[in-house]
Image (spheres, helix red, strand yellow):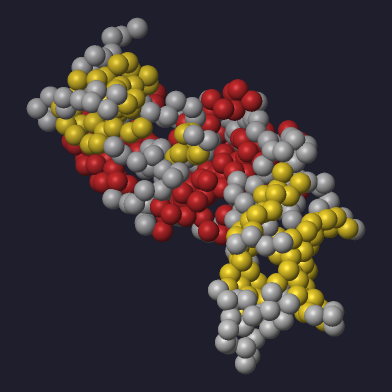
Amino acid sequence: MTKSPFSNKVFSGKYLLKEEIATSPLFHVYKGIHQFLNKEVIIKIFRIDIIRDQKDVQILKETAVEVLEQLRQVAGLEGHPNINWILDIDKEMDGKILYFVIDYLPEDLRTLIRKRGKLSLEDAFHITEDILNALVYVHSHGIAHKNLKPENIRFKDNNVIITDFGLGYIAQKAIRKLKLSGFLSAPTWISPRVLRGIDITPYELDLYSVGALLYYMLTGKPPYDEEDIAKTHAEKLSNKIELPSLINPNIPKKLEKFILKALELEDELFTSAEQMLEELYEAFSEIQSFSLFVVNEVRDGKKIKREIQMNETFNVKLTDIYVPIFVPAGSDGEIILKFNNNFDFLFDINFNPNVNFETGYKNNEFFIKFQTSKNYYGVISLKIQIKDKSSNHLLKNPIEIPILILPTENIEKEVKF
C-alpha cells in the first residue's frame, strides 16, 4: 500500500493527521485530532497529485475556487442540527495545500444498512424527516447538496448529519474535465432527467436522492445498480425498477406511491422539500396515525356540548403539532379530547400547569378529560407521548397541544391568570 503523504504531519500547528481513511477524486481524507481540544476530526486535503500537465493545473485552480465558494456559503449559514458544519479552512505548505476540517462521524447510512439489512418503517421515517428538514433549511438559503448518497448521511448522538454539501457535484464535474474515467460513479442516486438532458433544478436533484435513499433504507438495496454504469443508465432510461413492496412486504401502498413519486416514476413530481416533507407525513400516517377528532366542552349541569375543534380530522402523523383550542372561561366545565387508538398503544400525559384529569378507553378511543374553572383564563399546555407495550417511545417528540382559555363576553374582572 502506498504510504499516506500526510500521515503524522501537523497542520496549522494544531491538527495532527493520524491516518488516511479514504481517497476521493478531489480529496485525501484523514482522521486526525485537534491537539489543543483533544477532539477527533476529519481533515480533507485538496489533491494536487493528480496533476499531469498545465491544463490540469488550471482545471484544479478553478475547481479549488468553486470548492472554497461552496464551503463559504455553507459556513455562512446559522447552525442546523442536521448539517455537518465546517470547523476550519486553511492552507499548508506555503499555500500549496488547501484543506478543511469537519467533525469526525464514523457511522454512515451505508454502514447502518450493512449492519441491519434494512431499517424499520419508524427509523426510515425519522431519518428521512431529518434529511428533509435540513434540505428545507438550506434550500431556503439558495444551497443544494446535489450529491446525496448513503456515505453523506451520517449519525451523531442518534441525530442525522448531512455532510459534503455540493462537494460531490463539484468533484464529478472536475473528473469529467480532467478525464479521470476511473473515478466516475454510476448515477444510482441521480435523477434520470439528468441522463435525458432534461432541465432540473439543483433542489429537485436533492429530492430525487431522498426518494432513492428511502428506497434503500426500507429494502436494504439501492434502487439501481451501483457498480455497472451502463446498466444503471439503461435501467433508469427505461424506468425499470423492482417495486420496494416486493422486497419488503411491510411497505404500505401509500408509502410505496410516495417513493415512486420521488423516483420520478409517477406522473406528478415533487417540486420542493417543504412539499415532500408534508407528503412524507401523509405517507407514513397509514402506519401510525392518531386522530384528534372530537373536542367538547360540557358546561354546568346543562350538558351543552360545544365543539371546539374545527370540523375535520386532525392527524398527528408522528410529528410535533400545535393545535389552538379555545375554551370560554365563563363557567365551570370540562374538556374531553378523544384519540383513535386502534393499535392498543399507551399514552403518557403531562399538563402544565397541573390540572386534575382522568383518562380511559371507550369504543377503541382513548380519552382525556379535565376540569376547567370559572373565571380562569390563560394557556394550559398538554403534552402527550405515545408508547408501545414495551414502553418504547413512538414519537420523536411529544405531541404538544396548547389549550387557550379565554374570558367570555362581559366577564373581564376578578379573573385569575
Residue 309 appears at what percent x and percent y? 71, 73
416 with respect to 63 (left or right): right
Q: Is residue 311 visible?
A: no
In the rendered image of this protein, does residue 238 appear above or below residue 1? below
Residue 112 appears at what percent x and percent y? 57, 27
24 with respect to 49 (left or right): right
Residue 114 appears at what percent x and percent y? 59, 23
Residue located 70% across and 49% down the image: 348
In the rendered image of this protein, does residue 228 appear above or below residue 315? above
Quadrant for the C terminus in the image: bottom right
Question: Looking at this view, is 222 or 85 the one in front?
Answer: 85
198 with respect to 290 (left or right): left
Question: Looking at this view, is 183 or 296 the one in front?
Answer: 296
Residue located 24% across and 42% down the image: 68
Residue located 31% across and 39% down the image: 86
Quadrant for the N terminus in the image: top left
Question: Looking at this view, is 55 or 274 the one in front?
Answer: 274
Q: Is residue 129 visible?
A: yes
* Farthest left residue in view: 94
Residue located 60% across and 22% down the image: 115
In the rendered image of this protein, does residue 359 appear above or below residue 256? below
Q: Which quadrant of the view contains residue 331?
A: bottom right
- How many numbered markers are drawn? 0
